[in-house]
Amino acid sequence: MKILITGGAGYIGSHVLNLLGMAGHDIVVVDNLSTGRKEAMLYGKHVEENLENTEVIDKLFADEKFEACIHFAGSIVVPESVSDPIKYYKNNTENSLNVVGLCVKHGVKNFIFSSTAAVYGDLEGGVCTEESATVPINPYGTSKLMTELMLRDTSAAHDFNFVALRYFNVAGANVDLKVGQCTPNATHLIKIASECASGKRDKMAIFGTDYGTPDGTCIRDYIHVDDLAQAHVDSLTYLAGGGKSEIMNCGYGHGFSVREVIDTVKKVTGVDFPAEEIERRPGDAEKLISVADKIRKTIGWTPKYDDLELIVKTAYEWEKKLQ
């Protein structure tokens, strides 16, 4: 297929690009390289451009005649979204609207959207099905939910089908170490802990130890990035085969606390490092765990790397490779 990937130089986008490129698809990546890296794009043609430049992107659609679009481009740092919400509504919601509008204009019928478990907010009990209430507690989650609603309404009005994948906590690196997470000043827990273990940081922080969890720290559902990438490939196959629009959780269905993750990183790497306990971070939910039966049944997604130690191992080996 002829595929547009926005944000394909970023962490998750580069892993999906790797899989689709290996499968022989014809891919164009639009990425302004604000956080992504050229070296992460192992396949396809790169267009360095901002999505708000709609005249340029419109011409690209006209010239390339895409059959599908996978939309990753956006801002992802929760505390930053609290302090700078306008950035998130512009970069995540407004730019997504631009891309969706161009898909409709140019007859691109298959669309995969990078959504997030943050749409659920601080859900009572912290276990989320796709039918759970969506009450985001930060502008990042709200900006993604607004895009989901735009996709729903566009799909109802036009010959346009989408899959929105609500990611839980993505971590690790490609098992073959071809690509990994290179985001500068990353805020992901396993990335930060791996940087500590590899000597790139002197210490790390635990944001809040007074949550209503067994050890007082937040609990998250961690998913290996290669499994998440495969979910995009499976979603594309599903849509290309005539599948209808769906919103689906993408996680493993069980969680680990911040302390458990840090202990696992220390165990896997054999390196001890300080973890300073400080106050809670704005916009963090206490617990987020997926119920991900729907994605398995609907598109046949079968994760292969549901193992926290493996996730940590790939993240740490990637950090060492970056040195």
Image: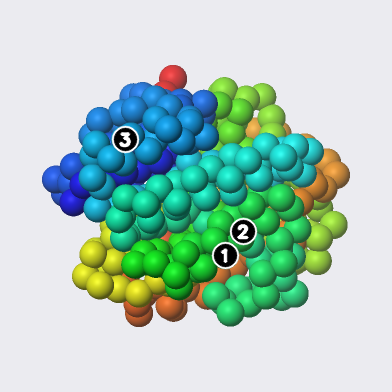
Compared to residue 69, the image places residue 245 above or below, namely below
Left or right: 287, with 129 as reference point: right
| Residue at 54% over, 61% down | 150
- 323, 288: nearer the viewer: 288
Locate residue 80: give its quadrant: top right
| Residue at 45% over, 51% down | 101
Locate residue 86: give its quadrant: top right
| Residue at 85% over, 57% down | 210
Give the labeled residue for mark 1: 149
Give the labeled residue for mark 2: 146
The Cα atoms of the two marked residues, 1 and 3, are separated by 26 Å
The answer to whether the residue labelled 2 contacts the one labelled 1, judged by CB atoms less than 8 Å apart, is yes
The answer to whether the residue labelled 1 contacts the one labelled 3, judged by CB atoms less than 8 Å apart, is no
Q: Can residue 175 be seen in this view?
A: no
Compared to residue 114, the image places residue 214 above or below, namely below
Where's residue 109, x and y in %?
Answer: 31, 60
Badge 1: how crowded within 10 Å, few (<14), some, or many (20+)? few
Where's residue 137, x and y in %?
Answer: 75, 58
